[in-house]
Structure formats: structure tokens, C-alpha cells
Amino acid sequence: MSGKLRIRVDQDKCQGHARCKSLAPELFELDTYGNAHEVGDGIVPEGLADKAWLAQSNCPEIAIEVIEE
Amino acid sequence: MSNHAPVTDWFHDFDHTDPHWTENPYAIWDELRATSPVVHTERFLGCYLPTTFEAVKQIAYDTEHFSSRRVVVRDVRPDVIPSPPITSDPPEHKPAKQLLLPLFTPDAVKKLEQKVRSICNELIDGFIEQDGCDVAARYSKHIPVRAIAHMLGIPETDSDRFIKWIHEILELGIKDQSILAKAIQEMSVYFADHIEHRRKHPTNDLISTLMNARDKDGQPLSDAHVQGSLRLLLIAGIDTTWSAIGSALWHLAKTPSDRERLIAEPELMPTAIEEFLRAFAPVTMAREVVKETEIGGCPIKPGNMVLLSFPAANRDPAVFPDADKVVIDRKQNPHAAFGLGIHRCVGSNLARMEMTVAIAQWLKRIPDFRLDPAGKVAWSEGTVRGPRQLPMLFGKAG
């Protein structure tokens, strides 16, 4: 295990609540419809692990996966 | 206008227009939730009420058995009047919603923030010199009305007319169909005038956006679609946010420790707003059962309505520890105030922005305030819950 976290937004489940963008703006971006996508390849930079978990636990659609690699 | 018999057996005969529900629905939901994930009433020509987060979520996600063609529970089932996308089921739903989504992203609504702040300050200027006022009537009511009017491109001075129509459609019109029909007719005439004017003088507002929209075949939207969407945006944009702002200020008026903390720690505001949305979620939606199914072990029969209570889901202790307490620094809060699934409220980012600005400006200018002990708080009846009378006194007590 590399000890890194990777986040992934399930595009079928995301409904654009935008809680993730509000809680972890460095990790998520919103498209023209306001739906979320992980930034880049979803690898969570150093120091942002807490924000990744916070975003995951606040998504009403449970659309965010946090994978420990 | 028919009045409903009082409720004596909430488990078999619930009624969301009953004065006990209006006074304190939370205690009723807690009691029902402890007995069953779904309850039923014969009132309103038959209606179910899911009481748990899980049951509400299952229903919201199931567009096959639960149609959105009717989204208000009434005494009768009037002819379906489409208001896309709220009354749309798949496959019509997605294209109708996609027309509106870009106008309501966080970045899009941020452009209105300064305007909303000015509205809040202007309103506060009007009463700050007094000992107190009815905060619902003098503050929270006006903010969303003027903000959505600005987006739609209709005069803010017509606000009183919008408020009257909403009251008729969402409250009086539950029991009196003639009031409902007349309000819809008046709104149609009003919007028809605005549409006609924009054919000759196009604008950049939301009305023009709907008029310029083209479907996948390059055709403009039907008049019925444009009218229905405008009616939806006006209704959805007002009562709801007005209620949320009012409920939050009501809580802060009676909880000095919370308002002191928010003033001392302004970075806590976004978390507090989410908790106000959870605990005082203003909107209950509805669905019509179109196919037989089962939810939480309870049989669900077609022809019934479902009162889709996101507020009750938000109070489910299985999902939210201390569900009945307002915890303004609650870290895990995946609440359903803006719904779940494809019908997630298109205006959620606008609502959050309005709430945040309205409460922050209030605390900045009137840090000390309390409920007027000589006055009475009055709550709206029906499916959008908020204070319609909120008498407060300014300054420290004693």
C-alpha cells in the first residue's frame, strides 16, 4: 500500500448537491451543470486526507468513493 | 372551504394540515418513525408518509413506481398541470432540467451575491432603529422574492402579487380548488405579458433564456413548458428560502450561545447553514403511486399519493446522531433538505447563498436579538414549513 488516497465521483449517482466542492475545493471541480468530478486522477495531495473523508461523508447521494491505495 | 376533522390517531389518519402538525411536526414524526417506516391515511384520497431516511430515499430514487406528475398533496386530484422539470419523469426530466442547471451553479449564483447583500442591508435599514419587528414580514420574506424576481427579469415591485399567488397555490389551494385555479390563471396572464414583451424587446434574463431554448430537434419550448417552468421557479424560489432564513433566525433568537459562537467564529457559518437546513428543512415534496410496490415491508398501492418528507428523513436518528438537536458544528451531515436523486433542487446553490448572506448580514448588524415574549410565532401550514410571523426584540434583554 502506498498510503495514498484516491477519490472518485460516481457520475451516475452525483446530483450536483455540491457539498464536496464546498468542503474540499482543492479536490473537486464542477461542470457546466454543477455536477462534480474529482480533480485530475483523484489522488489526494499531502495534507488533504481529512477533507477527502469529510467530502465523502457529507455527500447525500453517497457518490464519492475514497480508495486507500 | 372544507375544514378537516381533527386527528386523533396519527398512525392511521395523519394530516399535515392539522394544527398539531403545524405547531410541532417533529414529535409526531418521531412517534410514527418508532412504529413503522411508512404510515397511511385515507385523507387526501389516500396518502402514504415514509418516516425514515431509507424509505424516503428509496421512494425518491424509484421513478418507475412513484411519478412526479403530481407533487402537491391536495384534497382532490385536479388535472395534471406540468411544471417541468419538477413534474417530469424520465425521459422528459433530464433535458428539461439541463436547461436550468447552468443558470444555478455556485459560480452563476455568486454573481447575485452583492445584490442580495444590498437587499438585506436595505431591509435592515428600514427597521434597525425600532425596538423590534416581525422578522418574517420585514426581512426573510423579501429576500428570496427580490432575488428570484431579479433573475427572472420581473419587477421586484410586483413582489406582493407573487407572495399572494404562492399562498394561494401552496396553502389555501390545498382545500379550495377554485382558489388554486384562479391563482394559476392570474400567473399565466402575468407571464404571458412578459413573454410577449420580450418577443419585441429581447433581454438577458431567465425568461428570455427559456424563450430562446431549443430542444434536441431544434424546436422552441412550448408555451405550456415555458409557463410551467416560470411558475415553478417563482414558487420554488420564494416560500422555501423565506422559510429557511426565518427558521434559522428563530433558532438563533432563542439560542444566544449559538449566535455568539457564529459571531466569534465566522468560518463556522457554512457548517451551521447545513445544520439549519437539516433540522429545519422547509420543503416536503410528494409523489403519486403509479405502480404497486413495497417499501420497508409495507405494501404500496397505486392511486395513492406519498408525502415525500425530506424534513422527517433529516430527523432520523439512524442517520444523524442527536437528530433532534441543532448542532451547529455537526461534521457529518449528508442531509436531504434539497431532496435526493434526479429531482435534487435546482435552486440549492441560490438558496444556500441567500441564507448565508441573510444570516451573516443580520448577525453583523443586529448581534443581539430575542423572541418577543409578548408576541407569537406562527408557522405556515402544509408542505413548506417556516415562520410566517416572527416577532423579535433587538438588543440585550433586561
Image (cartoon, coloured by chain):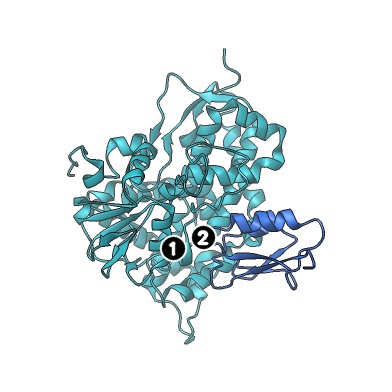
Chain colours: A blue, B cyan
Where in the figure is residue B130, as x and y percent of width and height?
55, 23
What kind of residue is marked 1? Answer: Leu
Q: Residue furthest right?
A: A46
SS of the residue at dot 2? helix
- CA gap between label 1 and label 2 equals 8 Å
What kind of residue is marked 2? Answer: Leu
Q: Is residue A1 above or below residue B392?
A: below
Q: Residues within 10 Å of mark 1 (few under 14, many from 20)?
A: many
Residue matched to label 1: B230
Q: Is residue B331 above or below residue A53?
A: above
Would you identify the image quadrant in which residue B183 lies?
A: bottom left
Quarter of the image where the N terminus of chain B is located: top left
Q: Residue furthest top?
A: B398
| Side of B324 where B365 appears, left or right | right
Q: Residue furthest front?
A: A1
Where in the figure is residue B362, as x and y percent of width and height?
61, 35
| Side of B320 where B360 appears, left or right | right
Looking at marks 1 and 2 on the same chain, the residue that comes earlier in the sequence is marked by 2
* Residue for point 61% across, 64% down: A64
Residue B201 seen in the figure: no
